[in-house]
Image (tube, rainbow, N blue to C red):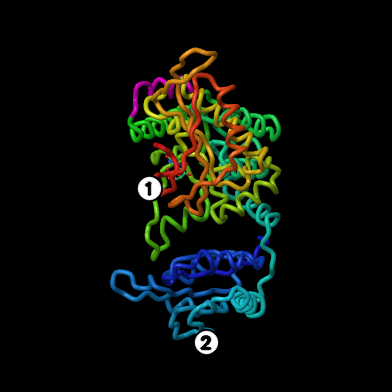
Amino acid sequence: MKQDMIVILDLGSTENTALARQIRALGVYSEIYPHDIKAEELKALPNVKGVILYGGPNNVVDGVRIDVLPEIYECGYPIMAIGHAAAACSNKLDRLPAGEAETVEILEKFVFRECGAEANWNMTNFIEDQIELVRRQVGDKKVLLALSGGVDSSVVAALLIKAIGKQLVCVHVNHGLMRKGESESVVEVFRNQMDANLIYVDATERFLEKLAGVSDPEKKRKIIGAEFIRVFEEEAKKLEGIDFLAQGTIYPDIVESGTKTAKMVKSHHNVGGLPEDLQFQLVEPLRQLFKDEVRRCGLELGLPDEMVFRQPFPGPGLGVRCLGAITRERLEAVRESDAILREEFKNAGLDKKVWQYFTIVPDFKSVGVRDNARCFEYPVIIRAVNTIDAMSATIEQVDWEVLIKITERIMKEVKNVNRVCYDLSPKPNATIEWE
Ligand code: XMP
């Protein structure tokens, strides 16, 4: 293994992740573990060079002030305690200083001088380490991956293709609610360029039939989620001798769904969420990475920019942007208008600047004129938002010229549309999606 590691033990700080990132920014790998880790578990971790006990406001759990097991001090690692009254530790700080430069100085002193760690955390080493670990884990067995074309599953695919080649079986389910060109690009990149073992399932008809006449947003989501699992299971059953399932779990998924002191932030609700009774062992090579690191890893593995910097796209896809009961006519209008929006945002240099942007087609019509005659057609609504964590969002103040250009193109090129609106609502009170 190539990388040294600094372990952070969570003693109730709310800043564990920020600290891990600051240490990684020094070029040294860092992971967070629960306060009650046992000495033998700690010693089993690869290349640990030092330990930070990070205390904070969540240091009382079930009425008891938490501490590390005394045996942790016997492991022989250099230990620094921050915000924690560690009796057996001489290296103690009440808190990290407010100034960035002072914090870096303290961390550098501990990480490099006291622990003797090397700054050897980089994507090349990470990828090499993961390849070795995956090969060790799966041997000559086969691994199955649901490849949606999203950033995380694409990067997992690229990494596993490098590690185990044709032992990886990717299944891409096109639910008919993908954006224009998206399924095609999954096939192009993974089957044609990377020579992956890729099963492409066009399940459009099945999904649209199941969704016909269903207008309640939550029912639509449930149908799409359940049908996705059914299709994937059917494909999995056709294959023989698969022991492993790869998943694009990333570090925030793990940290958010609970170190022992953090409050549960959100449960994960993705169409990629797979049935629990599938009897597979998990392969999760990105479980240690933050999102920006996942992107760097993808670039290093040679994935195209569009895939690596893809904006977030909900699992139920265009299904929640074709409002109410989905019809083919309006689904087509969403897909075509979204493609125009993406193209024009790219032309205007907004694609790397705006967090998420898309179009919505509601299930009502308005009166207009076309070729001197009355027409009764759908509106397209444009939405462009910025956010840090998707919990709240502000709207992007797009230039009028860009909006007018997009409007002209949508009016001209998209069938059954006679009106374009721009959604000015922040979250709250609106949500980002309309359903
Ligand atoms: P809302 O609409 O809740 O969206 O403000 C916040 C973020 O979550 C995405 N989103 C979803 N993602 N499955 C997903 O995987 C879903 O059902 C879903 N609903 C919303 C949305 O695109 C935005 O980025």
Q: Could you tell me residue 89's position as x and y percent?
A: 50, 84
Q: Nearer the viewer, residue 418 or 259?
A: 418
Instruction: Write down the quadrant of residue 260 in the picture.
Output: bottom left
Residue, x 43% and y 44% (percent of image)?
425
Q: Residues within 10 Å of mark 2 (few under 14, many from 20)?
A: few
Disc 2 or 1, which lies upstream in sequence? Answer: 2
Q: Residues within 10 Å of mark 1 (few under 14, many from 20)?
A: few
- Is 143 left, or right, of 324 in this rendering? right
Q: Which quadrant of the structure image shows residue 143?
A: top right
Q: Quadrant of the C terminus?
A: top left
Q: Which residue is mark 2?
A: 90
Q: Nearer the viewer, residue 3 or 193?
A: 193
Q: Position of residue 224 (x, y in %)?
A: 41, 31
- In this view, the residue in front, 180 or 33, is 180
Nearer to the camera, 127 or 18: 18
The x and y percentages for residue 28 are 64, 66
Q: Helix or strand or loop: what does disc 1 sit on?
A: loop
Q: Determine if residue 246 is in view.
A: no
Task: Identify whether 102 is placed above or below 304.
Answer: below
What span is in magenta? 204-215
Looking at the magenta stretch, what is its main secondary structure?
helix
Q: According to the image, label 1 marks what residue?
A: 429
User: Type of residue at label 1?
Assistant: Asn
In whole angstroms, how far apart are the C-alphas of marks 2 and 1?
A: 50 Å
Which label belongs to residue 171?
none
Q: Residue furthest left?
A: 63
